[in-house]
Amino acid sequence: MKKNWQIKLGVFLMIFSGVFFAATLLIPLSDLPAKTKVIGSTVSLILMEIVFWSGGLLVGKELFARYKKQLNPVNWFKKNQSDSVKNE
């Protein structure tokens, strides 16, 4: 039972880190002074990494590797090996 909430919290934190990523991209578009934009973007980027890796620690090594692979944009449009075997 203890592992179940850890995995759920870990997955939530990994997904929630996307909020900080979006903020990193949106802060430079705001009407804030340049110094504030740099500081805000940097803090947002650091928080994104901390939240993502904290979630990774909670879900464990195997599950983290699987989610990390799915979150990598390079792998989004690749066919799985199992898909190509089914088509043959």
Image: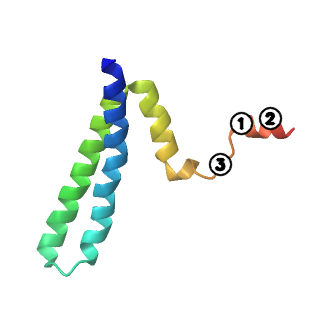
Q: Are marks 2 and 3 in contact (CB under 8 Å)?
A: no
Q: Are marks 3 and 1 in contact (CB under 8 Å)?
A: no
Give the residue pinned by disc 3: 78
Q: Which x, y percent locates residue 20?
A: 28, 56
| Sequence-wise first label, 2 or 3 | 3
Q: How far apart are the two marked residues, 2 and 3, measured between alpha carbons?
A: 14 Å
- In the image, what residue type sits under mark 3? Lys
Q: Is residue 69 left or right of residue 38?
A: right
Q: Is residue 25 left or right of residue 32?
A: right
Disc 3 element: loop
Residue under the point 45% across and 40% down: 68
Give the residue pinned by disc 1: 81
In the displayed structure, 76 sits above or below 84; it is below
Q: Which x, y percent locates residue 73?
A: 51, 53
Of all residues, the one furthest to the top in this rendering is 1
Residue under the point 47% across and 46% down: 71
Q: Are marks 2 and 1 in contact (CB under 8 Å)?
A: yes
Q: How far apart are the two marked residues, 2 and 1, measured between alpha carbons?
A: 6 Å
Crowding at mark 2 (Cα within 10 Å: few <14, some 14-19, many 20+) = few
Q: Which x, y percent locates residue 46?
A: 22, 51
Give the residue pinned by disc 2: 85
In the displayed structure, 12 sits above or below 6; it is below
Q: How far apart are the two marked residues, 3 and 1, measured between alpha carbons?
A: 9 Å
In the displayed structure, 27 sits above or below 64; it is below
Q: Which x, y percent locates residue 3?
A: 34, 20
- In the image, what residue type sits under mark 1? Gln
Residue under the point 51% across and 43% down: 70
Q: Quadrant of the C terminus?
A: top right
Of all residues, the one furthest to the right in this rendering is 88
Residue under the point 24% across and 43% down: 50
